[in-house]
């Protein structure tokens, strides 16, 4: 990514991308951000790749109109289905997705090259994680499973306790059966990091959990930070501000989003936009 004083645009189908924004803000505390949650059309994970690509291009255009200097696709489903289209439509704009950094981190974390991926139906069906992992390690064995109920659980705030663990057990436990189980689990959906504790509780203890939020933030920060660290480099940006945009439900976005962000979002600061 290039050095820029313009804000970094971040979008997701809703509030899940706030786990990525949280990690981005920790990595780049003086950068400004514009976050767009396409709450009117969530979930993306059950929709066709063509529809997700169309929605993603509209999100990017709305952020572009607000003067962003870089774009982070903070949604695994959109990264899996729309990254090429976004880069083609905005060749002058640095565009980072969450799948590639997550896959790279999984390969780095795994000692046995047996890796499990959990994500939405769309992300798993499109095979983007499987391809990205194999691009780093052709001999990797990847098992993948769609876990759509996790999205609803995360939004409901049922992120720990008996119900969350029972659903986690139903979804992931058998992925780790067998003589040579995976040693690494990729959380391939931006909603899943808030469920990491419940998921970890049903996994064999040695399994490493890779969170694409943290790995994407590290990738973005490394690119921007490299420019910042260059001799004579100007600061990336100013005041560490976030401008909030959503396509529906300012109060719900603020209420649920605050949990994902780990900081309060005020409903009256959320601008409702029509894409
Ligand atoms: N943000 C989506 C993702 O990371 C999950 C929610 C949805 O299905 O829209 O895949």
Image: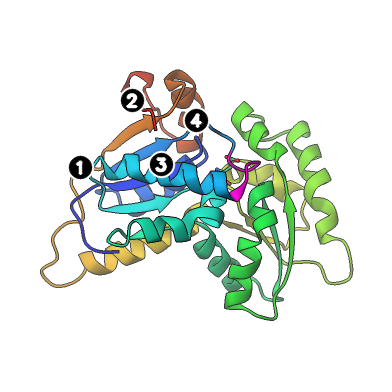
Q: Horizontal placement of 107 versus 113: left or right?
A: left
Callout 2: CB less than 8 Å from ligand 1: no
Q: Secondary structure at mark 4?
A: loop
Q: On residue 39, which mark appears?
A: 4
Q: For the point 41% across and 33% down, which residue is it?
A: 263
Give the residue furthest to the bottom. Answer: 139
- Residue 267: give x, y in percent of width and height: 38, 20
Instruction: Identify the residue position indicated by label 1 in the image.
Output: 239
Q: Nearer the viewer, residue 82 or 233?
A: 82
- Does the CB distance between marks 4 and 2 fall below 8 Å? no
Q: For the point 72% across and 76% down, which residue is it?
A: 112
Which circle, 3 or 4, is nearer the viewer?
3
- Residue 121: give x, y in percent of width and height: 69, 47
Q: For the point 70% across and 50% down, which residue is it?
A: 200
Instruction: Identify the residue position indicated by label 3 in the image.
Output: 58
Q: Secondary structure at mark 2?
A: strand
Q: Secondary structure at mark 1?
A: loop
Residue segment shown in magenta: 44-49
- Does the CB distance between marks 4 and 1 fall below 8 Å? no
**Color style of the picture:** rainbow
């Amino acid at each position: 990514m290039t050095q820029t004083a313009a804000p970094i645009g971040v979008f997701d189908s809703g509030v899940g991308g706030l786990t990525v924004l949280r990690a981005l803000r920790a990595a780049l505390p003086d950068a400004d951000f514009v976050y767009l949650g396409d709450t009117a059309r969530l979930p993306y994970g059950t929709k066709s790749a063509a529809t997700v690509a169309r929605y993603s291009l509209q999100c990017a255009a709305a952020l572009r109109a607000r003067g962003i200097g870089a774009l982070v696709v903070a949604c695994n489903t959109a990264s899996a289905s729309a990254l090429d289209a976004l880069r083609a439509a905005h060749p002058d704009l640095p565009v980072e997705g969450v799948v590639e950094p997550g896959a790279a981190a999984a390969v780095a974390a795994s000692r046995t090259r047996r890796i499990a991926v959990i994500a939405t139906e769309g992300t798993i069906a499109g095979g983007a994680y499987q391809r990205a992992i194999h691009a780093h390690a052709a001999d990797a064995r990847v098992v993948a499973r769609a876990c759509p109920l996790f999205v609803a659980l995360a939004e409901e705030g049922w992120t720990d306790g008996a119900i969350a663990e029972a659903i986690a057990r139903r979804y992931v436990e058998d992925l780790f059966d067998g003589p040579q189980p995976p040693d690494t689990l990729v959380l391939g959906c931006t909603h899943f990091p808030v469920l990491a504790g419940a998921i970890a509780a049903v996994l064999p203890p040695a399994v490493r959990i890779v969170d694409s939020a943290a790995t994407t933030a590290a990738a973005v920060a490394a690119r921007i930070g490299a420019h910042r660290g260059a001799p004579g480099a100007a600061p990336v940006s100013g005041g560490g501000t976030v401008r909030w945009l959503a396509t529906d439900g300012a109060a719900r976005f603020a209420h649920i989003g605050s949990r994902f962000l780990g900081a309060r979002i005020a409903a009256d600061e959320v601008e409702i936009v029509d894409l």
